[in-house]
Image: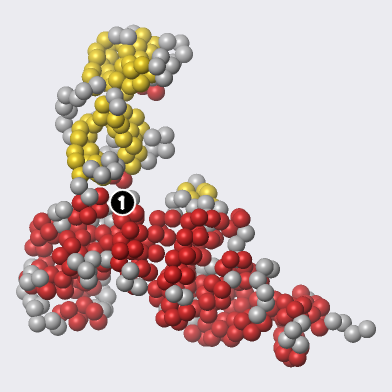
Amino acid sequence: MEEQPSRKISSLRKSGKLEEAWGYGCPAVQASPNDVYLKKAFFWVCYDYLKKVQGVIKERAQENHGNFNPTSTELSRINFLLEWVIWLNIAPGGYEYRSLLLVFQQNLESIPKLVLLLIRFRDDLFEDADKVPYESEKGESASLMLKFSRKVAKAWMELQDVRKTIDIDQLVMMFDRVRKEGRDKQNLIWLDYDEAKCLIISQRFEQARDCVISVLRKKQTESWAWGALAATYQQEAPNVAVRLFSKGLCHVHDEKFALPLLKGLAPLLAASGNEAQASMCVSRAVKCYENNGWKIKADVEKLTAQPWFDGDYNASDLSEFLESTSQGAMDLLHGPSEQCIAIISNIHQSGKGFWAYRDRDRDYSVRLGLYKNKKQPNPGQYILLTLSADTNDVITAEPCAVVAMDDVGSEEGEIDVNPKGYGFVNGIFVPPSLITEGSNGQRVKIVKILGFDKSKNRHSWKAIALQLV
């Protein structure tokens, strides 16, 4: 009895005779286009060929700084094979399309035909494990579901073929699903950033603004985040965009990251009559290209050809203008604000933040990224907090001088250490974390706050900092 075509294709493929499997399968699948088993068997032949192309790309990427972009020849080969996969039109629910995603997860955004294929079947692509981020000593890595969505977003922003086929509403729905079903926490901020950039391209500036603000509240010292918010105001409120671009330039850590902000700011300044400062922005951009030995891009050359541009202005004179112009930018991020003095009561167990004590009824959790000081904070240090008047969230925190505060004080006396590890100074409780070996009976000075003692159901003093006298 003659072997079934689907089994013959699978047998040839599994025995390493891929060319024979292709040669036999091509006419067979065209002759029987409704044979589901035959189509699935031929899919895996296409898959093996695609995997071989990707293998070459991966090998080259190891020697090319992780660049997984296919060459034009490789992309043509991939597209040829994907045309067959599309023609096969295998129903979702199996492992076929998910397997393609797994093979091409490093360079999916460079293959528009594959992006469009997988986006059709996105509802059946992911298993439960694909929605869970990978945990390592270095922290959380994005889940496969989140990686896929970010790759699609990048392809949508960069490739016209993808943008013409997938509309912005489909894209936003996909982002919302990732937030709902995925278990990522640390990396969701980058999905918000991707969504904001896609919405800006679609000129949905108000929606984009909401996404950017959620990012910027966590990345207040990053120039690119301020630049993204500025882009949402460029058409609707150029004067606001100027303020935000200026704020971003005040936070530039590496000059190459200033380039998109300088290119966005210069035309706005020229249009508002600040031609000298606009010229300084362009000169600064040109200098960055020259210092790095890069060819000056066409958009910058176009700016140098504007009638208002004057290369004789000194770009170093721009800093003071930017600092002045950026005033009030934080109000656009958080609304009206207020300031208060607080004292650091303890450091978060993770080391990524601390608690700031204001009085017996108010304390605030502060992320370390909001603390404007290079030195690590310690309990007992006084700080100036800037709070959102609307939400009472901490906007910034910075060291300040010691001041008199309600419910905060100091004591000096001998410490009596209990065998259980805690101690007392003049009747004030000292937690074990503040006590060092051999300190029993020593004369010490403590900083104390009035906190609520749950065991006694009342407020009582406790030490938050201790030093030997």
Quadrant location of the C terminus?
top left
| Helix, strand or loop under label 1 | loop
Q: Is residue 361 visible?
A: yes
Q: Is residue 137 above or below residue 255?
A: above
Q: Quadrant of residue 377?
A: top left
Residue name at image x 52 percent, y 48 percent: 136
Residue name at image x 43 percent, y 77 percent: 163
**Where is residue 375 drawn, in percent x and y?**
27, 39
Q: Is residue 89 above or below residue 203?
A: below
Q: Quadrant of residue 3?
A: bottom right
Q: Is residue 102 visible?
A: no
**Residue type for callout 1:** Arg
Q: Which residue is at the front of the view, 285 or 174?
A: 174
Residue name at image x 50 percent, y 46 percent: 137
Residue for badge 1: 217
Q: Is residue 36 above or below residue 414?
A: below
Mark 1 crowdedness (10 Å alpha carbons): few <14, some 14-19, many ≥20? some
**Where is residue 321 drawn, in percent x and y?**
9, 60
**Where is residue 376 drawn, in percent x and y?**
30, 37
Quadrant location of the N terminus?
bottom right
Residue name at image x 22 percent, y 34 percent: 383
Q: How many marks?
A: 1
Report whether 146 appears left or right of 213: right
Report whether 308 appears left or right of 32: left
